[in-house]
């Protein structure tokens, strides 16, 4: 039996990348969907909001880190969607990007204080020193809440695909730290 998958615009590339053919791009966050779906693929943290409008099975994709994205793809494959060859290729692409990022030189002489779990996951993955006394590291969507010496990290460049967004997050942090 083939699943009819509804996916948000943000994760269309993941669904295509793993070889799912029967899917529709949907906006389940703000509107009740007309069609019935076997599965909705959405951003992590929105399950309750989406479930109120659209009572379909939901798969949330966390994608702050390479590990998150890898685990998300593996979770989708456990639902028997996608092509084994495409899935293998997508996982290999994630692994290659992660290997490249982790090969870069990073200024670890600076302690940071990540103010969101989202950024903290990336910081910890790169083994950057964390301290409550460190320079606040703030995602761009929270920057308006902070004054004084802060490091602002762009986190959601929507014109990039999911894997590129994850890579960009790491590169932005590395470049930010290396510029200090």
Image (cartoon, rainbow, N blue to C red):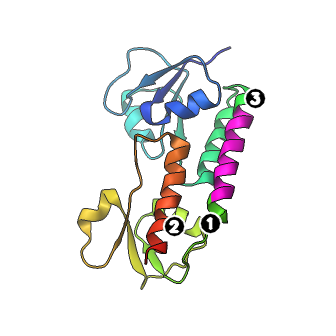
Determine whether 126 is above or below 74 in the image: below
Percent position of residue 52, x then y: 37, 32
Dot 3 falls on a residue whose secondary structure is helix
Dot in front, 3 or 1: 1
Dot 2 falls on a residue whose secondary structure is helix
Q: Is 74 positioned to the left or the right of 175 in the image?
A: right
Determine whether 120 is above or below 166 in the image: below
Dot in front, 3 or 2: 2
How would you rate the neighbour count of disc 2 (Cα within 10 Å): few for under 14, some for 14-19, many for 20 or more? Answer: many
Cα–Cα gap, marks 3 and 1: 29 Å
**Residue corresponding to mark 1:** 104
Q: Is residue 88 magenta?
A: yes
Q: Is 143 positioned to the left or the right of 64 in the image?
A: left
**What residue lies at 65% left-to-right and 63% top-to-bottom?**
102
Percent position of residue 26, x then y: 41, 25
Q: Is residue 16 magenta?
A: no
Determine whether 109 is above or below 47 in the image: below
> Which residues make up the magenta segment?
87-100
**Residue corresponding to mark 2:** 174
**Residue corresponding to mark 3:** 85
Cα–Cα gap, marks 1 and 2: 8 Å
Q: Earlier in the sequence, mark 3 or mark 1?
A: 3
How would you rate the neighbour count of disc 1 (Cα within 10 Å): few for under 14, some for 14-19, many for 20 or more? Answer: few
């Amino acid at each position: 039996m083939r699943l009819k998958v509804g996916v948000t615009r943000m994760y269309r590339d993941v669904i295509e990348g793993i070889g799912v053919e029967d899917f529709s791009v949907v906006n389940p966050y703000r509107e009740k969907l007309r069609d019935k779906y076997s599965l909705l693929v959405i951003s992590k943290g929105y399950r309750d909001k989406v479930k109120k409008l659209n009572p379909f099975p939901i798969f949330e994709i966390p994608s702050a880190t390479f590990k998150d994205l890898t685990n998300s793809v593996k979770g989708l494959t456990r639902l028997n969607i996608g092509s084994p060859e495409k899935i293998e290729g997508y996982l290999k692409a994630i692994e290659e990007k992660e290997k490249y990022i982790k090969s870069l030189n990073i200024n670890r002489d600076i302690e940071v204080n990540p103010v969101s779990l989202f950024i903290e996951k990336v910081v910890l993955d790169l083994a950057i020193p964390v301290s409550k006394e460190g320079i606040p590291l703030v995602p761009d969507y929270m920057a308006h809440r902070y004054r004084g010496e802060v490091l602002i990290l762009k986190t959601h460049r929507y014109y990039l695909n999911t894997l590129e967004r994850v890579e960009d997050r790491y590169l932005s942090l590395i470049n930010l730290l290396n510029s200090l």
